């Protein structure tokens, strides 16, 4: 319980699997105006990364005439900071959209140490226009791009690879090996509970930047969890959205969180956070950014063993003359 406390997703797993009781939680989103006002007093601006959030993920949602995306930076205790939000006005099948997404994947964001930090993992919605999404995703390594889709069950694991999918001819679909389901209901409950936290050191705290439009906060808080009585008499819960209000700000945030879960950030030990912060939040220099996988798998630095005292050098023998070699032509 001590490890789970403060993180709604972990608390739900504890109650359901360990205690064997239903996890009770509120399903009300906080008022969007309060979030907007808090963001207006933020210590960091839109498009930048505040200190203590060295890992960066992106969530991408595909709509009929556009693609929307959100950048989120992550820190210890699953604290996060919203960095940027944007829209590409093209369908996912359009080459123009692919060009924009390619550029987004290469984009870097300046942090509090004036270091440029790149994107560690991008999660793109693959539930609709799956083949078009796969057409773009397969052009990039699986360590940088995954496909995701939300599942509503509150008993679903936070993230799990989809079962091997086959086409009508029975052929295994190539994208199934990097396609993941994630538990949208559980993540929504956690998001709305964490959004009201104001202590930046509290587990799960969500920092919001200056400069986001009102529409972003309206979308982020667009859904409510309500009880519904089934014909069997049992009570089920479902998330309801105002038909007049878009919710891509919510969807892209959850997709970015799914990418963070895939990276293992929920359980990443302090020593690895120490290493990632040292790598990415040290004063700016000309050294390139390490990929997260390389950084976390690199051996810890250890002191060099003492070297024996050098022996007295022997007199050098006269150097023998070297044969002259003519340079080969035609080589640059």
Image (spheres, rainbow, N blue to C red):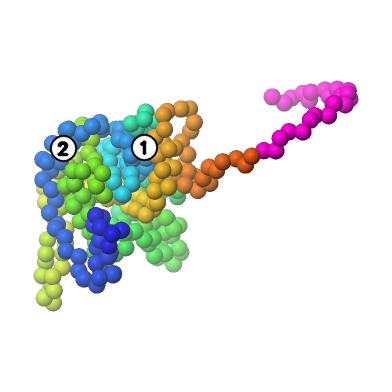
Judged by its main secondary structure, the magenta piece is loop
Q: Is residue 190 magenta?
A: no
**CA neighbours of label 1 inside 10 A, class few (<14), some (14 to 19), many (20+):** some
In this figure, which residue is indicated by the disc labeled 1? 104
In this figure, which residue is indicated by the disc labeled 2? 38
Give the percent coordinates (x, y) of residue 56. 36, 42
Q: Is residue 13 left or right of residue 54?
A: left
Magenta range is 307-332
Give the percent coordinates (x, y) of residue 35. 15, 41
Look at 42% across and 64% down and name the residue there. Answer: 164
Give the percent coordinates (x, y) of residue 214. 15, 37
In the image shown, does 274 or 108 lie closer to the viewer?
Answer: 274
Task: Give the SS element for disc 2.
Answer: helix
Look at 45% across and 48% down and name the residue there. Answer: 143
Q: Nearer the viewer, mark 2 or mark 1?
A: 2
In the image shown, does 144 or 265 lie closer to the viewer?
Answer: 265
Give the percent coordinates (x, y) of residue 19. 25, 70
Q: Is residue 73 visible?
A: yes
Q: Is residue 9 left or right of residue 273?
A: left
CA separation, marks 2 and 1? 27 Å
Q: Is residue 313 magenta?
A: yes
Look at 26% across and 55% down and name the residue there. Answer: 7
- Quadrant where the C terminus lies? top right
Residue 39 numbered tag:
none
Q: Is residue 136 visible?
A: no
Look at 51% across and 45% down and name the residue there. Answer: 300
Q: Residue lying farthest bottom? A: 232
Task: Give the SS element for disc 1.
Answer: helix
In the image shown, does 177 or 6 lie closer to the viewer?
Answer: 6
Q: Earlier in the sequence, mark 2 or mark 1?
A: 2
Asked where in the image residue 189 lies, by quadrant, the reply is bottom left
Q: Is residue 6 above or below residue 100?
A: below
């Amino acid at each position: 319980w001590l490890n789970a406390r403060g993180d709604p997703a972990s608390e739900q797993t504890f109650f359901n699997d360990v205690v064997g009781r239903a996890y009770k939680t509120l399903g009300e989103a906080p008022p969007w105006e309060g979030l907007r006002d808090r963001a207006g007093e933020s210590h960091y601006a839109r498009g930048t990364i505040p200190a203590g959030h060295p890992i960066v993920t992106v969530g991408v949602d595909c709509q009929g005439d556009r693609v929307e995306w959100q950048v989120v930076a992550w820190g210890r205790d699953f604290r996060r900071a919203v960095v940027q939000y944007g829209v590409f006005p093209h369908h996912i099948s359009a080459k123009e959209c692919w060009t924009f997404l390619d550029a987004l994947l290469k984009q870097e964001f300046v942090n509090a140490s004036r270091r440029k930090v790149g994107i560690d993992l991008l999660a793109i919605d693959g539930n609709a226009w799956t083949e078009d999404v796969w057409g773009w995703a397969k052009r990039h390594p699986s360590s940088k791009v995954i496909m995701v889709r939300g599942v509503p069950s509150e008993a679903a694991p936070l993230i799990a690879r989809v079962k091997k999918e086959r086409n009508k001819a029975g052929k295994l679909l190539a994208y199934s090996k990097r396609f993941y389901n994630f538990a949208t209901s559980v993540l929504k409950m956690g998001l709305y509970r964490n959004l009201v936290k104001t202590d930046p050191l509290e587990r799960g705290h969500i920092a919001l930047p200056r400069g986001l439009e009102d529409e972003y906060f309206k979308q982020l808080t667009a859904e409510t969890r309500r009880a519904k009585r089934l014909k069997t008499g049992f009570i089920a819960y479902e998330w309801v959205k105002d038909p007049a209000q878009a919710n891509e700000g919510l969807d892209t945030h959850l997709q970015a969180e799914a990418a963070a879960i895939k990276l293992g950030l929920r359980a990443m030990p302090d020593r690895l956070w120490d290493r990632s912060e040292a790598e990415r939040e040290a004063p700016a220099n000309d050294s390139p950014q390490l990929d997260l996988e390389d950084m976390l798998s690199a051996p810890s630095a250890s002191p060099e063993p003492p070297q024996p005292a050098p022996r007295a050098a022997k007199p050098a023998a006269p150097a023998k003359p070297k044969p002259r070699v003519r340079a080969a032509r035609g080589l640059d």
